[in-house]
Amino acid sequence: MAGSAVRGCRNFLQQAGGLSDVRLCRQLFSLAFAARRDVTEGQAQGPLSSFPGCGSPRRCISINAAGIGERKTALEEFEEDEADFIKPKFLIEDEGVNVVATRGVNIMHDPWWNKGTAFSEAERDRLALRGLLPPRVTTMEDQILRIMEDYRTRNTNALGRWRMLRSLHERNETLYYTILCNNVARMAPIIYTPTVGEACEKYSELFRRSRGMYFSAKDLPEFHAMVHNWPSEHVDVVCVTDGSRVLGLGDLGIQGMGISIGKLDLYVAAGGIHPSRILPVAIDVGTDNETLRQDPFYLGLNQPRLQGEEYFRVVDGFMEAIFNRWPRCLVQFEDFQTRYAKRLLNRYKGIYRVFNDDIQGTASVALAGLLSAFSAQGGELRKKKVLIAGAGSAGVGVASVLARAMAQESEGFGGATGFENIYMLDKDGLITESRKMPDDVMLFAKRHSTENGIREGLSLEETIRLIKPDALLGLSTVGGLFSENVLKAMKDSTERPIVMPLSNPTANAECTAKEVFSVVGAQAIFASGSPFDDVSLPGGNIGHANQGNNMYLFPGRSGVLSVTPHGTLSLAHQATLAVAGQL
């Protein structure tokens, strides 16, 4: 049963050329849901069919002491653009009933049910809202126009727009997600990178109303009980961070919650998951950021981070509690420090459905960009040389998936491992076999050689001039690392150099699009983690500043991963390669 959906997923991915990024993610998630429906023999376990991208609307009824009446849902007030993406035709139609247990000001203060001034005359009477709202009944379109006018004219600062959208999210989810789904491209840089980085840095200061759940080390004995405090009976995706390595900003403690919220908003907008089926989480084990611990506004535990077995006990308790209540959900690990990221993934992947976006998501999008860029360069993948600046979890994840792709292409040419042509540097320079580093890093360590000049600690520029790579990837979080001399070395190394500064946020990008095209010229192939404007070049040419960000893949890719049996990642890997080949 599951096999037919899996084959359908693979066939779709192989034929996905020409789809937009958002459309591809939604199709991918829809096929993933079909696979899970097959596995569960027809039991509906996926996203509700009442949200954009997830089939037809369901009919919702408000029930309370005053009577019964109809209530519009988000999709009923959301006019779907048929040209934007294809509706999945196979999702279960849900004609269920929603019971509204609250009335009056309580329903107005509940973002899941609040409709603002769109409550009808009958609803105002039935729900005891008469006199609590201005007399005019407005439509969803009226509300959207009011919000977008404010967004365009009165909130021109990026952080100001983030605050505005968060405020809307906290009071009216239907309106918030309707606007977000209609403006994903425009608002993604606000709710996600690069703006979310600044928002996380100021999260405690900006805090107004709680969203998601906080699993604090001091509450460990209560995890199994407190998980039932979350009001939704069904959760499909949990995005969790311990705040230890938020983007490239370091240890932000509990303030990493901002990235969990932003990621899940994209699952809704691009992956089609119903908003009631997502759960943002921050695990609080303390922080080693002394500035935060001295900040009177900081909302997390005022203690150094737990380490070792104490740390694992907290994360183990969280995982057990989450999967005890929602055994079929997917947990996405987000922005965990390098020392624990891979260990946690390996610890749980044979037991639970887990996904690490920094390792697997970054690897997927980097591979997608590289395959496309190598196609433009010409030549065989197995012969390409790639230099990666940054040996953390993201850098190692990219190197590993690229090595696998190279090895697969090399099977008919002697079975090369794929490690030979991938070079890695960290703050101490080129990594060679003389280092003592984690095993997954040492797979890419090079042997000292007087013949070819390979030696420990070569600088970035020296390494480029020595090995002449076809592509340079930045995963170091060191802003400005790709200096003018480094870019000149890349210009001399190959006819069409690939430069991909993938670190976020913008301040941590290894270089800008303007710097690359100014030095390398129109022949450069550029992609970055944070968005940059295209660059005007002499002769009327345009240097295209492509964006290679995880948000183009993780909503759909995680949908595929969530349907695979525990610990089985082959489908997710094949899906990644298939999607990468289409971008």
Image: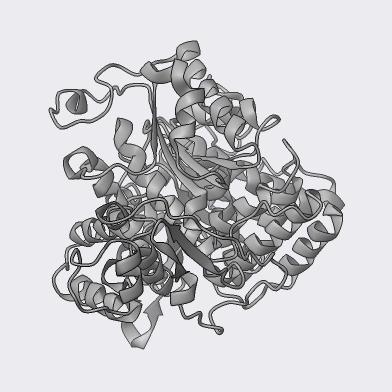
Question: Where 36 sits versus 200, above or below?
Answer: below
Q: Residue at image x 51%, y 24%?
A: 224
Residue 502 visible to an observer of this rendering: no
Q: Residue at image x 28%, y 75%?
A: 143
Whole-percent x, y for residue 490 in the image: 45, 57
Whole-percent x, y for residue 251 in the image: 32, 31
Whole-percent x, y for residue 7 in the image: 82, 60
- In the rendered image, which quarter contains the C terminus? bottom right
- Viewer-side residue, 248 vs 356: 356
Q: What scheme was used to colour the molecule?
A: one colour
Q: Residue at image x 48%, y 75%?
A: 76
Is 217 placed left or right of 20 in the picture?
left
Q: Residue furthest bottom?
A: 540
Whole-percent x, y for residue 402 in the image: 64, 48
Is 291 placed left or right of 481 in the picture?
left
Q: Residue at image x 58%, y 77%?
A: 85
Number of dots carrying numbers: 0
Question: Where 451 sits versus 546, above or below?
Answer: above
Q: Residue furthest top?
A: 309
Question: Where 84 sits versus 324, above or below?
Answer: below
- Viewer-side residue, 379 vs 555: 555
- Viewer-side residue, 192 vs 269: 269
Question: Where 565 sits versus 344, above or below?
Answer: below
